Image (cartoon, rainbow, N blue to C red):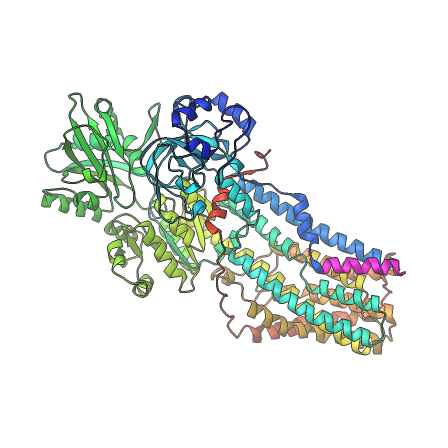
Amino acid sequence: MVTTALGAGPGATSGIGAAAARPGEDVLREWEVTPAGLTEQEAARRLERWGPNAVRSHRARGLLVLWHQVCSPLLGLLLAAAVVSYFVGERNDAVIIAVIVALSVGLGFVNEYRAEKTAESLHARIRHQVLVLRDGRPREVDVTRLVPGDVVELRLGDVVPADLRLLAVTELSCDESALTGESLPVAKDTATVPAGAALAELTGCALMGSVVHAGSGRGVVVATGPRTEFGAIAAGLGEHQLETEFQVGLRRFSMLLVYVAGALTTTIFVINVVLHKPLIDALLFSLAIAVGITPQLLPAVVSTSLAAGSRRLSRLKVLVKRLVCIEDLGDVDILFTDKTGTLTLGRIEFMRSVPLGEASAQDVLRWGLLCTETEFDEGRAVGGNPLDAALWNSPAADAQRAAVAGCAKAGLLPFDHERRLVSVTVTDDSGAALLVTKGAPEAVLERCVQVPGEARRRLEAEFAAGNRVVAVATRALPAAAAPTAEDERGLRLAGLLVFLDPPKPDAAAALERLAKLGIGVKIVTGDNAAVAVKVCRDLGLGEVAALTGADLDGMDDAGLTAAIARTTVFARVSPEQKARIVRLQRGTGRDVAFLGDGVNDALALHAADVGISVDSATDVAKDAADIILLEKSLGVLADGVAEGRRIFANTIKYVLMGTSSNFGNMFSAAGASLFLSFLPMLPSQILLNNLLYDTSQLAIPTDEVDEEQVRRPAHWDIAFIRRFMLCFGPISSVFDFATFGVMLWVFHAGPAQFRTGWFVESLATQTLVIFAIRTRRSPFWRSRASLPLVLTTLAVVVVGALLPITPLAPTLGFQRLPLGYFAALAGMVLCYLALVEVGKRLFYRTRPGEAGPRAEVGHRHLRRRAARFSTSGRLAH
């Protein structure tokens, strides 16, 4: 597939396929840009012309939300039956049904739309930056503000921000699996390819959505947003998002209700037809019952809970890419995290250079400063890794700046995670060429000759002190040329660069809090094992077991799975090994979160149930994450976990009380139909009852949650919900039948008064039962509901009791009730709540089952990456 031309004007013939067939210099001229990049004014003009560099828009769409509310098949059948009823003479009932359905839909719409607006505002706070040349200087801009003609710098781990024609490369290779399906990285160059070449053969281009696997490069943007190859593929996937574990549970729960509603509705309809009741009335009654058992406002309750939770989390410095990820965060019981910035301060400081051999401390520092991939804008470091930034910003570096300026770089071999090195070729004033290599001490030392024993002793001492160390080595070259991996041999160790990254003062308390939440914490780091163990010891974890990447290579999956359970620190591990650890841990049935912010964390972030990164993370890490922390802190993460569990607990309250009471109502309706000569409740009354009941439950998201519910992960368990429904539904029916007896044999009620009595009793019992079901403790004194929930619940009960004496009563088919009925009602409600308490204690003696298997969704990585190239309502046009 080859992208079509962008349109008239500059770059009119420069789709990515056409650009790949032309030299980079020609593409620059066509886009009217120099190698120094665009000016800010020209970039602004092009942004206005081409629009944001986005393939999707995170905007709250009112019509789409409304469609979600009205697309229920049951609702459609009910409205169709109401229309038929209208034309056969039952006009009042038909109008009342239509009005009640409209109110129910409107209530759901308002709450879900508010949640969508919350999601939109959250998305607007997540930023993805790209390094470009503007006005001849490197600067970081938001990825959505990239325009055709921009000159972009690519570094290891970057997600390519647009379709680029490459102008210069250094050992550059890109992972294009999300676009082409090719699992191996593709080597890149600047050569042209024949016109019409396949997507996988465009070696002179870097494609939007691919990831820089190794090396570095520079390219000019020739297509943005939907005009890119990635944009076309993302558009083909539609707007459907990944299903989270929580959404899978909701879907399974909905299927359970479909089966129950289908069976009972058919039974009730057949019974009423066999007993020769009017066909239309029987159909409307059955459909209304079916709508009644369906928690119509469940999406609204969930959305309200998630939106309120996301607002609380944002104040706690936790941003979620999708609201439903909050629920999955609450499920976590194992956390894998890196060390830097979570257990340590993350403010890395250069301490000293340690000469080893003939070099001086100043030589080691100067070579360390020269051997870097960092770009500079007016003396300020732009891009690069934290260790290089700490080195360049240290006071010791100031004295070396003049010496560094006197050396010219003749070539660079960028860092990658296989070599764990970066090398440069430099020349001094005399023209002598020198290879300088810097990187992980183990990797440098194995490439050195004549390593003194003192070097290894000094290195071990620095590691034991918990310091981070980078080794520097050199080798004379016959001529200045770009270095290769083969040149990194026969080196002479020059010395060590030592950095300090002390433990966080609050890390020990955060670890203790996570332990109280039932979350085990394991450290996965690229640092030395001794350093990580020292940090764990300083934080009060005692002596912990550690494994290195070399140890992992010698284990099969079964052996490593067993070792993970007894190991706390995994050190010097590769990106693939991190992902393997996460996958094996998930295979044991545990819910796994991974917290990381580096290029080498991306695979593990994708492999985890919940990927967590930070706002300052690398592009590829933020792209892979579900949740972004504005502060890299385990304490902030603990807040997020607790909030996720609180939201899940409140959602389950609605599900449990709704399914049990609604199932009881259907069971009661079926039984009443067997011996009554009239419908036990009119269809419009059933729908009104359901609307009032659901309205009271919109306050559930504000409810308090018992401490023991937050202390452990909670999972969807359909078997548990089904058992709860079958246990507590019949308890509700017992009091429905008691009401039938009171109305028929005590008050000798006719059809209208009978329906009124059941309406009031049904609404009171199924609404007030929330106080018992919301907690496993004794309600009212050991666990109190929130004030909004108390007020809305009592208000709905009062409204239900007063409706029969309002002017609306005749229209709704109600009749005034005798005062004695309310005395009987009070007694029945008290007995009902007491019986529910007894049933609750018996029910919870059995342990709920475990969560079902996880669902894997196709295009998982591609859909996640598409979210990166998206705008909120403020940018889209």
Residue 262 position within the rendered picture, expressed as x and y whole percent measured from the top left: 69, 68
Residue 774 part of the magenta-drawn span: no
Q: Position of residue 695 (x, y in %)?
A: 70, 56
User: On the rendered structure, is 394 left or right of 357?
Assistant: right
* Residue drawn at x 24%, y 31% as measured from the top left: 482
Give the left or right position of residue 36, taking residue 15 as reference: left
**Residue 829 can be seen, yes or no:** no
Quick one: quadrant of the C terminus? top right
Name the quadrant containing residue 193. Answer: top left
Our reading of the magenta stretch's main secondary structure is helix
Q: Residue at x 44, y 27 (%)?
A: 150
Q: Position of residue 211 (x, y in %)?
A: 39, 42
Does 86 appear in magenta? yes
Provide residue 266's location: percent of width, then percent of height.
Answer: 73, 71
- Closest to the observer, 161 or 639: 161
Q: Which residues are magenta?
A: 74-90
**Residue 684's image quarter?**
bottom right
Residue at left 45%, top 56%?
609
